[in-house]
Amino acid sequence: MSQSEVPLTSAWRRKLHEIIYEADTPAGKLFDILLLVVIIFSVILVLLESVPRLGKLYSEEFIQAEWVITIFFTIEYFLRIIAINKPTKYIFSFYGIIDFLSTIPLYLTFILPGGYNALLAVRSLRLLRVFRILKITRFIGEADKLTKAIKSSLPKILVFLFAVVVISIIMGTLMYLVEGAESGFVSIPVSIYWCIVTLTTVGFGDIAPVTPLGQLLATIIMIMGYGIIAVPTGIVSAEYTNAPKNNDNQVKKNPEYRHVNTQVCQNCLAKKHQDGAVYCHNCGYSL
């Protein structure tokens, strides 16, 4: 390859990277919109195929449409690999694995004849790809705030869930002793299952207490359930409400802190670069 061809190839790959991985340019936004339409259409296709009458009546049409979608996703998958300097960064990333799994189902039918319907669940994974597309500028700030709120709330939620498990074990054991096998509480695990179902206000109704004491305990568990449902929501909401204050303080200290771009490093796929950044904050590669 001559030296004059190298810049052209590099510029071509950089342009391809901007279109596929970023959404700050008209071409990038158009690609994301097209990808979103194809993803939604493919998921609707999976839903319609699961309807027995439609699946039999339009089986050939469904397969043809699925081939078109599969070819589109296959081309997109390989273009994503070509557009970056380190393909393994993408291939073994979360979205890289999701992209691969959502692309291969139709190809697997050559190896597993008759397994087309069995792979419906794998094809529905395509819906997870929507989260990548929601990187468009107007959603970046809100998505970051929600992600940070969930991460900050995680330790509190885990402690809370541990307390719920302890309560379920204790109350389930009490119900086993009070009701016994005659009422359907044949073992402590079954009683714990009933307690969790009642505590979460699901109430399948497959097991129910019949003794006055058992019904009293069930009433207490039901009342506790209303409070338990509200706790995780309150924890995340509190963290989410405090997030803008924290961001505003950081912006005052460092005006370049806030980012509203979708720049993704072509070398290491790092995100969340500051506005106006020239080099990647992770590997130093030119943006």
Image: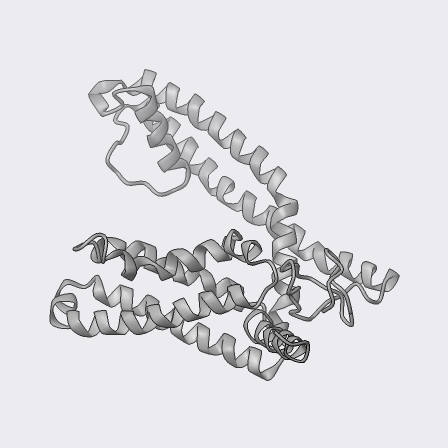
Query: Where is residue 132 shown, x and y percent of the image?
Result: 53, 64
What colour-coding does the image apply?
A: one colour
Q: Residue at x 44, y 21 (%)?
A: 170
Based on the displayed image, in which of its 4 quarters is residue 138 positioned? Answer: bottom right
Query: Where is residue 186 shown, x and y percent of the image?
Result: 25, 20
Q: Is 5 positioned to the left or the right of 131 in the image?
A: right
Q: Judge whether 233 appears above or below 277 on screen.
A: above
> Which residue reaches farthest front?
2
Work out whether residue 139 or residue 65 is closer to the camera in this orientation and state it: 65
Work out whether residue 208 or residue 253 is closer to the camera in this orientation and state it: 253
- Quadrant into which the N terminus falls: bottom right
Query: Where is residue 191 shown, x and y percent of the image?
Result: 33, 25
Work out whether residue 34 or residue 160 is closer to the camera in this orientation and state it: 34
Q: Is 72 positioned to the left or the right of 138 in the image?
A: left
> Which residue reaches farthest right?
253
> Which residue reaches farthest bottom?
26
Based on the displayed image, in which of its 4 quarters is residue 146 positioned? Answer: bottom right
Q: How many marks?
A: 0
Q: Residue at x 82, y 66 (%)?
A: 256
Q: Residue at x 59, y 48 (%)?
A: 234
Based on the displayed image, in which of its 4 quarters is residue 66 positioned? Answer: bottom left
Work out whether residue 71 or residue 118 is closer to the camera in this orientation and state it: 71
Q: Judge whether 201 appears above or below 21 on screen.
A: above
> Which residue reaches farthest top?
177
Q: Is 16 positioned to the left or the right of 112 in the image?
A: right
Query: Where is residue 252 shown, x and y percent of the image?
Result: 86, 63
Q: Judge whether 221 appears above or below 100 on screen.
A: above
- Quadrant into which the C terminus falls: bottom right
